[in-house]
Image: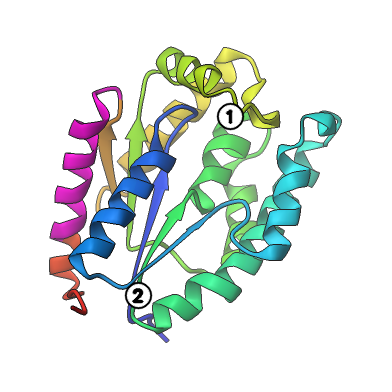
Amino acid sequence: MRQKGVFITFEGPEGSGKTSQLAALADYLQQTGYPICVTREPGGTPIGDQVREILMGLKNTAMQPRAEILLFQASRAQLVEQVVLPNLAAGKLVLCDRYADSTLAYQGYGYHKFSLEQLRPLIAFATGGLLPDLTLLLDVDVNIGLRRRMQEGDVNRLDVYECAFYERVRQGYLELARLEPLRWVTIDAGRPPEQVQQDIRQVIMQRLEAASLLPTR
């Protein structure tokens, strides 16, 4: 059964500002009167948050790539069933900080060990085949993004790879966007945050109008 709401995901390499941009957009949409649900990956549920602690913990550097991939899918499956699908069925706009494309970008293009053909069936099983209606790629130069992350100070296990890894992730995202131009919109996130947010709002409002999702007040 097709969901009633609209599912929008935010993707991007490290330091792209997607989390803060999503939060600013959510505040704007709430003030405008849209019914929204904001969530994130990995996590977004009590079970998913426990998985997130394992995935992000700096002490877990011995984690094998296959174990990492499966843990992401476990958190994702819980999020889809417990949060995303119920809120879409209720007619809400669901905004998610990362989703399935992160697995393709990081564990596929980034690790350079697993093909997309290997990963896609796992993702489809975890999500039940649920795809976003719109995915925003906040693109930023790798060096700028990593410098931002270090300034933020909240470093996790996925922030300590070599620079070449993050460049592969970025190029992977750009390739994914190129392959699905109807779903993806790429936004230059290297500019001042206010300009980035303006572009995001313009894209979102156009998409909500096309989807006939209207404010409730």
Q: Which residue is mark 2?
A: 92
Asked whether residue 196 is drawn in magenta, I would say: yes
Q: Nearer the viewer, residue 97 or 46?
A: 46
Span colored in magenta: 190-206
Disc sitting over residue 134 in the figure? none
Q: Are marks 1 and 2 in contact (CB under 8 Å)?
A: no
Relative to 142, 91 lies left or right: left
Q: Which residue is mark 1?
A: 110
Nearer the observer: mark 1 or 2; the answer is: 2
Name the spot of residue 106 as percent of width and height, x first. Answer: 58, 36
**Residue at position x 62%, y 60% in the image:** 76
> Does residue 77 lie above or below 119 as drawn?
below
Relative to 60, 91 lies left or right: left
Residue type, label 1: Gly
> Does residue 185 lie above or below 150 as drawn?
below
**Where, by quadrant of the figure, is residue 196 drawn?**
top left
Q: Nearer the viewer, residue 1 or 199?
A: 199
> Does residue 173 lie above or below 35 as drawn?
above
Q: How is the image coloured?
A: rainbow
**Residue at position x 65%, y 49% in the image:** 118
Name the spot of residue 117 as percent of width and height, x first. Answer: 59, 49
At label 2, counting other C-alpha atoms closer than 10 Å, the crowd grade (few under 14, some 14-19, many 20 or more) is many
Residue type, label 2: Lys
Name the spot of residue 128 as percent of width and height, x first. Answer: 56, 72
**Residue at position x 62%, y 51% in the image:** 42
Name the spot of residue 147 as percent of width and height, x first. Answer: 48, 14
Magenta-colored segment: predominant secondary structure: helix
Asked whether residue 130 is drawn in magenta, I would say: no
Q: Secondary structure at mark 2?
A: loop
